[in-house]
Each structure stands twice: as structure tokens, then as C-alpha cells.
Amino acid sequence: MSDPTLLVLSSLAGGDKHGYAMMEDIERFAGVRLGPGTLYGAITRLERHGWIRPVNSKDRRQPYTITGAGREHLHDQLASLSRVVRTGLRRLENA
Amino acid sequence: MKRAMRLLARLYPSSWRKRYGSEFDALLEDSKPSAHDALDIFCGALKMQMTTWGSGRVTLASTLAGILVAVAVALFLALPAHYLSQAVLIVSPADESVPADESARRLVDRIEQNLYGRDYLASVIHEHNLYWRERLRMPLDDVVENTRRDISLVPVPSPGNRNAFTVVVQFDYPDPRVAQRVNEELTSRFIEGGLNSQLTSNWTFRVSVAPSLPLRPVTPNRARLMALCLLAGLFAGLTLAIVLRSRRTVSVG
């Protein structure tokens, strides 16, 4: 999985994080290192859709949190991905 | 590198910078600088710019890209193609037991002098009607000098025999058939020069690859030229559009 928006949502599903913490978390759980441009491109899109929002903070390192709509979207996307994974694995085993 | 990344971050649209600039800069301070991240920021800035563009700036960028592509096409048509005919000769000692490094070097020097001689090259130029445009506007000695630059002799040691060597004879010319004919002449001259030399009683000459008829030009590399101009056009268009946007933002602010 390399869709940066899903990676960011999956990271925030585990708790609020700022940009650098998301980069490190994603690298740990997905083995993918998002560059700063890619990460903030995803953050911009997700915030525009209302799937994440900034958390009040006085630090320049702005933390974000996943919204209810974001959880729902992530759930739908992962369920769809999971169906694809199950089907692919089953077909590989039967081949 | 960190400074370059901060500069690249300024390419983002000002509205985006107003909202995310401070936290993005904080992220860059935390990150380890790398060329990969710098490229990522550049691409991110371009994408963000393009999502906020109006039709005017898209038109401007496309026009500039178009102009540079047109320039590439014009160059493509105007630049003369050059074809390289090649021949490969194998020069080996008659008696392989005799070390002949020194005499091999003297042999090649002697043949080169013979091949690059002014009178000989002048006769080749006249015989094959070479460089007729240049001959109209420059003295023959200068044309001969140009001809020398278009000839190359590349001696390469032969593997397995430390005394034998291979010589690649090349001639570069805008007409492929003329390039081949002149290279045939040069290759014959090379062999004759070698055989007539007093040094060559110990050497044999064999044509391994006859002078080739080049099918494709070596220059210009037209695909590369087109690709470079297209990239330059896109880059110039994007940069101009970003600069115009920044100036407009400053004047409005």
C-alpha cells in the first residue's frame, strides 16, 4: 500500500501526531518513507475533505487528528483493500 | 541541502504557505536533509501550484513550452546531421617473439604523419568535393584543419597479443556515402603508409571491419534535443507562472 492519504489516515488512527511523527510512524509500520512534499500534499487533501483536522497547539509542529468522517473513509478503503488481498491470495493458492 | 529545501518550500503557492508554511518549515527542520526530499518538495510545490492555477497561467506555461518545442524542431531541421564511418584494422608483428612496443608507437606516429599531411588531405578534399560550402568562405588550410578534426585514429591493444594492436579509423561527415568513400580512401592510405614505411618490414596489416556505411547520424541526438527542449519549456513556463503569481500576490498585499 503506497497511497499517502491512506498511510496518513492509518497513522492518525493510532493517535494524534505532527508531520515528522507521522513520517516516522509510517516508515515503521509500512516500510515507506514519505517525503515532506508528499506528506503535506496528503495532509492538504485530507484536511480539504474533512477527514483530518489540526489540533489546537502553540507549537510550530502542528499535530493532526483523524475525524469521524476520516475513520469511516479509512474503514471503507481498508475493507475494500482487504477484499482485494483475500481474493488475490485465494487465487494464488488455487493457481 | 537544508537551505535548498527551505528555498524550494518557497515555491508553494502563497495561500498554501500562509496556512501550512510554518509547520512545513518545522518539519524540514526536524527532517534529515536529502536530495530525494528536495526533489519531493519541488514536485509537491509544482503539483500544489498547478491545482491553484487559473486558465491564464496554464495557457502561459503551455505557450512557453510550445515555443521551446518549436525552437527544438527548428534546430532539428537546421542542424546538419553527422555520420561516422568506421573501419577496424589489425596490425600485428610478423615475428611475435620480438617485443615491439617502441616500434609499434613509431609506426603509428609515422602513419599519422602520412595521413594528416596537408597535401594529401587537400587532394582528398578536391577529389571528393568535401566541405564545398566552407571552401567558398575560408582558406584551404583552414578546411584541411577541419578535415583533420573529422578524422580519428584510435589504436587499441589487442587482447592476448601484447605486440599486436587494433586501429579504428573513423571519418565524420554530413553525407553517409561520402563518409564511407573517404574512409575507404583513408584506410587504404593507412595501409599503404604502413607498408611503405621503412619500419614496417616486421608488420602485417589486416582489415577486420571494412569502412562502414553509417545508417544513423551520430549528431545531433534529435530525441535528446527534443526531450531537453520540452523539459526546458515546461520548467521555464512553470517558473515564469510562479514568479508572476508571487509578484501579483506582493502587489495585491
Image (cartoon, rainbow, N blue to C red):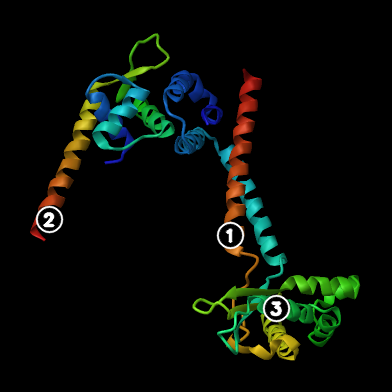
- What's the chain of the residue with tag 2? A
Tag 1 residue = B224
Mark in the foreground, 2 or 1? 1
Mark in the foreground, 3 or 1? 3
Structural crowding at the residue carrying mark 3, measured as other residues with C-alpha within 10 Å and reported as few (<14), some (14–19) or many (≥20): some
Mark identifier at residue A91:
2
Count of numbered tags: 3
The amino acid at mark 2 is Arg
Residue at image coords 16%, 38%: A79
The amino acid at mark 3 is Val
Residue at image coords 47%, 18%: B22
Q: CA distance from mark 2 to mark 1?
A: 44 Å
Give the residue furthest to the left. A94
Tag 3 residue = B108
- What's the chain of the residue with tag 1? B
**B119 vs B125, nearest the viewer:** B119
Residue B37 horizontal/vertical position (percent)? 45, 35
**Both labels 2 and 1 in a single chain:** no
Image position of A84 (left or right of B59): left
Mark in the foreground, 2 or 3? 3
**A85 vs B31, nearest the viewer:** B31
Among the two numbered marks 3 and 1 on one chain, the one whose residue lies closer to the N terminus: 3
Image position of B237 (left or right of A81): right
